[in-house]
Image (cartoon, rainbow, N blue to C red):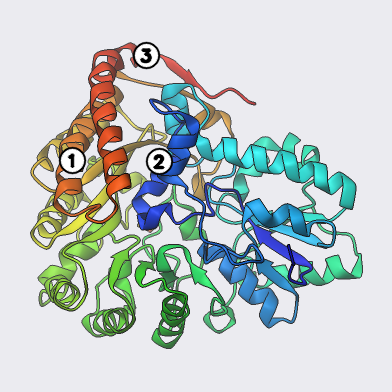
Amino acid sequence: MKLIDIDFVITTDRSMMTNHHGREFLGFVATGPPIFLPEFMWSYICCPKPKVDKWGRPREAPYGLRKIEASLVEAGFRASVIDPDYVFRYLSKAKAVLIGHHDYFAYGPPSSEWWLITGKVPINRRLFTKFMSRLAEYKKKYGFKVVVGGPGAWQWQWEDDKIDLWGVDTIVEGEAELVVKDLAQKILDGKTLPRYIQVGIDDSPRVSQIPVIKGASVNGLVEVMRGCPRGCSFCSVTLRPLRHIPIETIEKELEVNASNGVLGGIFHSEDVLLYGSTSVIPSEEPLRKLHEVAVKHLKNIAWAHVSLAAVVVAEHQGKILSKITDMIYSKMNQRYIGVEVGIETGSPRLAEKIMPGKSAPFPIDKYPEVVEEAFSIMHELNVVPAATFILNFPGETADDVVKTIELIERLRSYRSIIVPMIFVPMGKMRGARNVIASVKITREHVEAMKVALDHSLIWAERIMNEFYLKDSLVLRVLLKYFMKIVQWKANGVYRNLGGFVDRELVIPKL
Ligand code: SF4
């Protein structure tokens, strides 16, 4: 096979280098262990191989890798994203392999939670371990450098034995568009590399320093904002400055995706409804312009995240949400919009302690009512949320969990998936591995899991039948089979969940 001339191979493992059949939602399946199905079938459902060109360059690649590629290429370095199946053909000549990942060792949510509950290693960790073990063999032979980064970089501190085992030279934590150019130059000059780089706020790129991607991103994901103004203490996003990407840049990236045949899009932001706003109040004009460019270039659009308070304000303020969804449904090929939302807790007491800005501009003691109203608005407008809440926050009481259970019960009539997460210490609360590696489950936690499971099983089937998977027959059959097994297993889980009460769940160090 002919290879392109590159010094820097940018890549990741199969759990990341995939478009999940064009259904971002299926990416969640890659955070679980392969249960009920053989591993190859589970992998096919969640992470099929992407289309690649004759040089092994994937048609779609994770957005973060595309940004690193663009930074290096614009600075004159010879770099390209390469599919993990093709990486090994480049290693005899490569100067470095740059790897990005959301969840290297499956400690992020929800991987760690599936791991704790099932006692089985999630598929993303299995695939990453396999990839790195093979890479390490090649590194011994050819001596290229290995640099790791991305949102999951913090996990290397909990697995520091793997740094030498797999020959990792540098770990970059934080936004890497600027520092990667210095690193690349040091690698070409044969200089010693730092073992660890923490990119602080001052080293984060300004908007004008964030390059436009050169190749298509997975499922057309395009960033519209970085950072979040709400400042929740458990969230790593709060460690970044808040920036809005100019509409011209967003349009250029949509064009890159469309010209590569990726006609679906995902607007990525921690709160898409705050695009172009200088406060926590959504602003109609920039949101309208943002969606006009989507209508111009794409067939469909999804939102990565919105905050529930912004949903309520956007509808109270001149029905902004109704207008935007009307525009999308009347001009694009879709009848619903998928989005992730974070409920986190139904307890005003706990909310005030850990996320006082989450409900703004509404007072935090009204947070449960805000959540309920947001769900009702989204239900009416066919905005379908995949919602999460968090158990085992530091300082959580039994009564806090009861309040969360009551809130989820009140959400029963609204179309949504609700998934419990177990607290992972990130952001300002970042701490030691043992906070998630060993978790004591209470009766209230079990009850909250049951209520959420019940809610999600009912709605998952309805959502699938109503909106999802109209085209791919094979995938539809597989997923229906998968859903049936999950429902059947869930009955067993219901019966057995009680067995978790007061048990210490443990993730062993592998
Ligand atoms: S609202 Fe979401 S993204 Fe923003 S700080 Fe809170 S948890 Fe993080």
- Percent position of residue 46, x then y: 42, 44
Residue 48 in sight in this render: yes
Q: Is residue 468 above or below residue 122?
A: below
- Looking at the image, residue 155 sits to the left or right of residue 470; the answer is right
Residue at x 32%, y 45% (from the top left corner): 474
Q: Quadrant of ligand 1?
A: bottom left
Badge nearest the viewer, 3 or 2: 2
Mark 3 vs 2, N-terminal side: 2
| Front position in the image: 415 or 80 | 80
Mark 3 vs 1, N-terminal side: 1
Q: Amino acid at mark 1?
A: Glu
What secondary structure is marked by label 1?
Answer: helix
- Percent position of residue 298, x then y: 32, 76
Quarter of the figure with the C terminus: top right
Are the residues tagged 3 and 2 within 8 Å (C-beta)?
Answer: no
Q: Disc 3 beta carbon < 8 A from ligand 1? A: no
Q: Which residue is mark 3?
A: 502
- Looking at the image, residue 425 sits to the left or right of residue 130; the answer is left
Q: Residues within 10 Å of mark 3 (few under 14, many from 20)?
A: some
- Looking at the image, residue 93 sits to the left or right of residue 473; the answer is right
Q: Amino acid at mark 2?
A: Val
Q: Which residue is mark 1?
A: 461
- Percent position of residue 488, x then y: 24, 23
Q: Residues within 10 Å of mark 2 (few under 14, many from 20)?
A: many
What secondary structure is marked by label 3?
Answer: loop
User: Label 3 vs label 1: CA separation?
Assistant: 32 Å
Residue 179 in sight in this render: no
| Front position in the image: 196 or 41 | 41
State the mark number for residue 29. Answer: 2
Residue at x 52%, y 80% (from the top left corner): 207
Mark 1 vs 2, N-terminal side: 2
- The picture quadrant where one finds residue 286 is bottom left
